[in-house]
Amino acid sequence: MMVLVACEESQEVCRAFRAKGHDAYSCDIQEPSGGHPEWHIHGDALKALKGGTIITMDGLSHDIGKWDMLIAHPPCTYLSNVGARHLFAGHELNAERYSKGLEAKEFFMRFLDADIPRIAVENPVPSRIYCLPAYTQTIQPYEHGHPYTKRTCLWLKGLPKLSPSDLVVPVASWCPSGSYSKNHTSRHKGIFTKDRAKNRSKTFPGIAKAMAQQWGTEKIPQHD
């Protein structure tokens, strides 16, 4: 299958699908840290959604036609429930932040509404103020071999729910909000105290592997 992994610089999901024999490409405005520029589209992910001819960072062009699957990780800074506390100063709405949230919602919806038969969009639990569509399921790292909690939502179209692949006991939160981490014990403070946004955006290898194994087939059951 032709798989686009949008807003991914780590290439974790891209590499997992490549390992299963698929033509997967990551796309991000950042250069990839995953070590494969030959699989990376450096630029606007919305433009890459259109398919056709794409150009990877090694300068080669690829005629991919239409994508068979999209896995998208749009930025969550302004949409997440964790960031909702910044929307109000007292009882007054932060108009600038709210406007940026609306822009982020529009970006998010471009992926969810893309003309691609199989779609998975990943984000944290969203703030209710932006009225995003209901997510299909939530997943946790400890369901896929990593002993941490980090609740993540998946919005799915044409794909079944992701099933736990390797259940383990969580020992800590992965990367909670700054205010949360300051007021809790070491078990709940999280692994990271700096660069939380960057570290939270990384996909766990076990989750990426589960996506490739469960969704990386030409014939998959449709989600109800």
Image: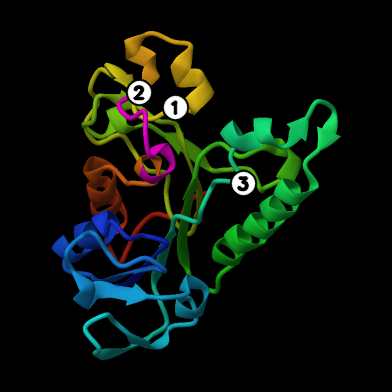
Which residue is nearer to you in this view: 75 or 122? 75
Residue under the image location 37 percent in, 65 percent down: 30
Neighbor class of circle 1 (other Cα within 10 Å; few <14, some 14-19, many 20+) is many
Amino acid at pointer 3: Tyr
Asked whether 197 falls inside the magenta stretch, the response is: yes
Please indicate whether residue 201 sits to the left or right of residue 172 in the image.
right
In which quarter of the view is residue 72 placed? bottom left
Please indicate whether residue 101 sits to the left or right of residue 45 in the image.
right
Q: Main secondary structure of the magenta part?
A: loop
Which residue is nearer to you in this view: 177 or 26? 177
Residue under the image location 39 percent in, 54 percent down: 221
Q: Earlier in the sequence, mark 3 or mark 2?
A: 3
Q: Earlier in the sequence, mark 1 or mark 2?
A: 1
Asked whether 121 falls inside the magenta stretch, the response is: no
Reading the image, the residue beneath label 3 is 78
Reading the image, the residue beneath label 2 is 190
Q: Range of the magenta residues? A: 190-198
